[in-house]
Image: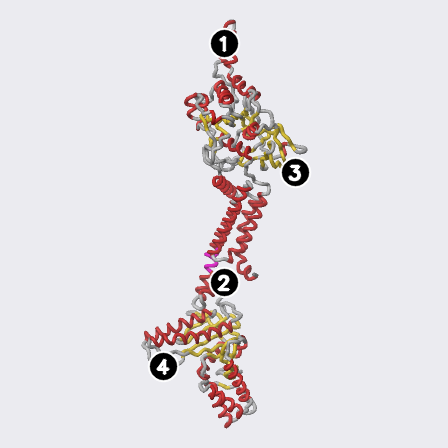
Amino acid sequence: MAGFFKRHALRILLSLLLALPILFNALGLFDLGFIGRLEDYAYDLRLQWTMPDTLDKRIVIVDIDEKSLQEQGHWPWPRNKLAHLVDLLFDRYKIDVLGFDVLFSERDESSGLKTLEQLAQGQLSADPAFHAALGKLRPSLDYDQVFADSLKGRRVALGFYFRHDGQPDATLGSLPPAPVLRTQGAFEPARIGAPVATGFAANLSPLQANSVAGGYFDLASLSDADGVIRRLPLLQLYHGTLYESLGLSLARLALREAVIGLDYRDQEKSVLALESITLGQRSVPVDSDVAVLVPYRGRQGSFPYVSASNVLQGKVSPEILRGAIVLVGTTAPGLNDLRNTPMQENYAGVEVHANMLAGILDSDLKERPTSAAGIEVSLLLLAAALLALALPALKPLWATLLTVGLMAGLVGANLYLWRAANLALPLASTLLLILVLFVFNMLYGLFVEERSKRLLTGLFGQYVPPELVDEMAKDPGAYSLAGESRDLTVLFSDVRGFTTISEGLDPVQLTQLMNEFLTPMTQVIHQHRGTIDKYMGDAIMAFWGAPLHDPLHARHALLAGLDMIGRLASLQDQFQARGWPPIRIGVGLNSGEMTVGNMGSEFRLAYTVMGDAVNLGSRLEGLTKEYGVQIIVSEYTRAAVPDFVYRELDCVRVKGKLRPVGIYEPIAEVGQCDTAVLDELIRYEAALASYRAQDWSSAEERFQVLRDHDPQRYVYQIYAGRIAHFQQHPPGSDWDGAFTFTSK
């Protein structure tokens, strides 16, 4: 684990640094505007994916559409016509509640009453008949009063709007009475976070006085930076008084609730945080702006639309309007009530109120809980920690699968909470972080680690197998071509009688033979984690323990040497079939301190090993033909691989070395050697002991028994010859049992 952190410390640190801006944005330390826009886009997608897209017949929109304007005249219509519309809706069509998404802030002078009044005060002031006729006509010509009378005693809510431009109050008309509030304990409206209006434009006083309720219909007070209407405040403050929205007002009328309940909690001692608004048993969760996410049902047309002109002409089926909540509004482009919503651009503003009303009635409103910021920060921290640690350790395919799986899991969990618990939790920031860390790690792997890997491949690819280069690439800084001293194992192999073999083949055949021989030998060395040093004609030099550190270098080298001999034996039939002579090799191995690095001249360099231990390995390979064996290891290699059975061949002084060294023939791993072989080795060791004790008679007798049992074992013949020589020429009391070679 410590090695992992050491290798990937920079990559992990950079990943965490990349996560900081997104995390700071979630903490509110600074604002990355594009993340907010991404979050809005993610919200819109979830809304579109999960919208019911059904028709809600409880709420009907009486539309002042283009058809109505063509048939009934341009807007505004005379108020007596609107009074007739109201009478028809309640008396003929039997609707339940009526709301106007239209403002009546100016007097209606279309009846001509004002002109008649001027005549009565001027030219016809002395005409009693004119005054009498005017007195009879005045009630029917006062269209505002006619309209006001049509509202009296009916569940009608008039719409108005608040201003938020910061300019001094410029009020028109009269505000409706503030709704009756039920609160918990002491209540100060200014502390609950509702938007504060600076002015208003409301309906004429007679109209508002005859209407049982009123609600504001302004939609832009909390629109997002892109101008899209995603949420609406249910309450706004004006001069310290709370007023309700049109949707809330209509819901209250439809539910026959006279009181609005405010449920809030103490966020701090001096701050009241409104948690929800209640209408009877229905609870509407609100955010810090006392706002609610608009529960859009679908694209425009999620509620029945009827033309206002058709209502006035009595052409609408009574079944459509009976018992319905009716909103009077407009879709005519010229009347400028088309809005930008997550469902579509140019969405009728009146249908926004219809969606809000339906959501309140159904208690089906998405909520952004107060804990949303904490959840977002927790997800960001978890994702950053997981990916910063996991991605450096994974290959691209697995990294991609992890990233896709994590994103899919996050989206799935978010959608589940969206649908099952009506929670609108942050999503985009965590998805963005996951994607950023994935892209960064892929690019880092491509341009940094792959570059290091390519560099390593260029440096060591000709010496070590690709899988070792992959392993080295995990920590490229740990490898270099600079010279250093290490404990390594070196292997030399050479073809016996190569000169004779080469003389019997033409150049093409010789080239083919060497390729067919060297390729499998190299494969064996690579399979055992060896590094090819060089090819010297028919000879191979390899070493273990560099450039990749290998604590089992001696064992891997020994197994490679034995496998080379075994692999060569399996090739003999193939060589014979091609008319090539049989090949035998000698293998010498030695372990010890060696200098390894890039060595050579300014014209050519090679990654190689040097030192006395290397020279000894070369000498041991040459001794294989002296002792009639295929492989010899030094006492140092034997000591490094103690779980093998060895035949001690001799104690020798090779050319250039004064200190004698024991040389051994590896037989097999412990536990895999035949009993007969073990018995022979015991007898052989006893014969060696007699030889080194200069007990020539006993030694001669013991080696004779061994020769009789295995006459092909050349080492027995060597010792028989030496014993015969020493019987005639005793070595003396200072003899140490070592045999000195004077040639390579």
Q: How far apart are marks 4 and 1 (CA)?
A: 142 Å
Instruction: Please state which amino acid type lies under the numbered disc 2.
Output: Pro
Mark 2 or 3, nearer chain start: 3
Do the residues under discs 2 and 1 have CB atoms within 8 angstroms?
no
Q: Which of marks 4 and 1 is in front?
A: 4
- Left or right of 218 on screen, residue 602: left
- Left or right of 452 on screen, residue 421: right
Give x and y (percent) for residue 120. Answer: 51, 8
Give x and y (percent) for residue 613. Answer: 50, 77
Task: Find disc 2 in the rendering and name its residue.
Answer: 476
Circle 3: element type: strand
Q: How far apart are marks 2 and 1 (CA)?
A: 103 Å
Give x and y (percent) for residue 711. Answer: 45, 87
Mark 3 or 1, nearer chain start: 1
Instruction: Please state which amino acid type lies under the numbered disc 1.
Output: Leu
- Span colored in magenta: 444-451
Question: Does the image show residue 227?
Answer: no
Q: Distance between the residues labelled 2 and 4?
A: 46 Å
- Left or right of 509 on screen, residue 416: right
Q: How many marks?
A: 4
Circle 1: element type: helix
Q: How far apart are marks 3 and 4 (CA)?
A: 101 Å
